[in-house]
Image: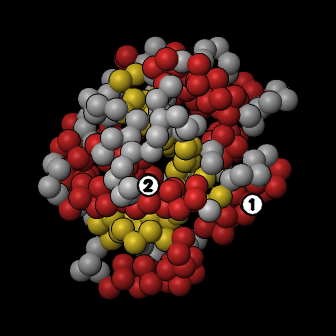
Amino acid sequence: MNALTPISSSRRPRVLALANQKGGVGKTTTAINLGTALAAIGEKVLIIDLDPQGNASTGLGVDRKSRASSTYDVLCGDIGLGQALQETAVPGLCIAPSTLDLLGVELEIASAKDRAHRLKKAIDEIADDQRCCDLTYILIDCPPSLSLITINAMTAADAVLVPLQCEFFALEGLSQLLKTVEQVRNGLNPRLMIQGVVLTMYDPRNNLSGQVMADVREFLGEKVYETVIPRNVRVSEAPSYGKPALLYDLRCSGSQAYLRLASEVIKRERELRAA
């Protein structure tokens, strides 16, 4: 069985939270294009948009006017996760969209005893939804903060995938993210782990990018994926057309990098399950 063979749908879907409290690191771009790449090689993928900006939803062509139900409603307990799902133009990829209402969700659930487990409960219940019984991956696009929303994502996740830009101060704040992961593992979700770190916005013409990449690999070792996501104009343009880069321009360097990343993620998941 090679790395591109889809994981059996008889298993519980693997839940990966894409998190980094720094903004502008390519987190949403990675969620969209990794999800698309996984679907392209036969996985069944759900992206849960937990960023109030809703950029993952927009980048997958979900118009704001059509988001009658959203992850805000799910976290508030008004609807089940299955009711919030929308199909995308990518076969095998659906999304639970976000709206600006999500900005107020922490006030809504702050006093609830299960406030950190709302998303986990919603994901656990989705197994009974016929549209979702064959999901193999759930990717959670977290907001750029270590908030209660992000804690919900980490509590629900099997692992955290960290996008890290190849720019100055790349490691700034990473120690706090790793500390938060450890706190969630100790107090809320003992199975949580770092699945991997993906370096984004790499520019081979920039000496700084190469130095940052070397520093990150020295600091984090095997946790860093071999695949590096380059700076690419086509990847940047794609969201304005409501498309993932793989649909906008499959042959561009960014699209090809995300296909390699998907293969690497699946390979790492198989190794983790076999361990």
Give coordinates of residue 34: x percent, y percent: 37, 49
- Kind of residue sitting beneath label 2: Ile
How many numbered marks appear? 2
Q: At x 31% / y 61%, what residue is drawn?
A: 260
Mark nearer the N terminus (1 vs 2): 1
Residue located farthest toward the front when viewing the structure as drawn = 1
Give coordinates of residue 149: x percent, y percent: 65, 39
Q: Secondary structure at mark 2?
A: helix
Q: Is residue 131 visible?
A: yes
Viewer-proximal residue among 130 and 179: 130
Residue 182 is labelled as: 1
Q: Relative to 50, is 100 above or below? A: above
Q: Which residue is tagged 2?
A: 266
Query: In the rendered view of the protein, which quadrant contains the N terminus?
Result: bottom left
Q: Secondary structure at mark 1?
A: helix
Q: Is residue 173 visible?
A: no
Q: At x 40% / y 61%, what residue is drawn?
A: 264
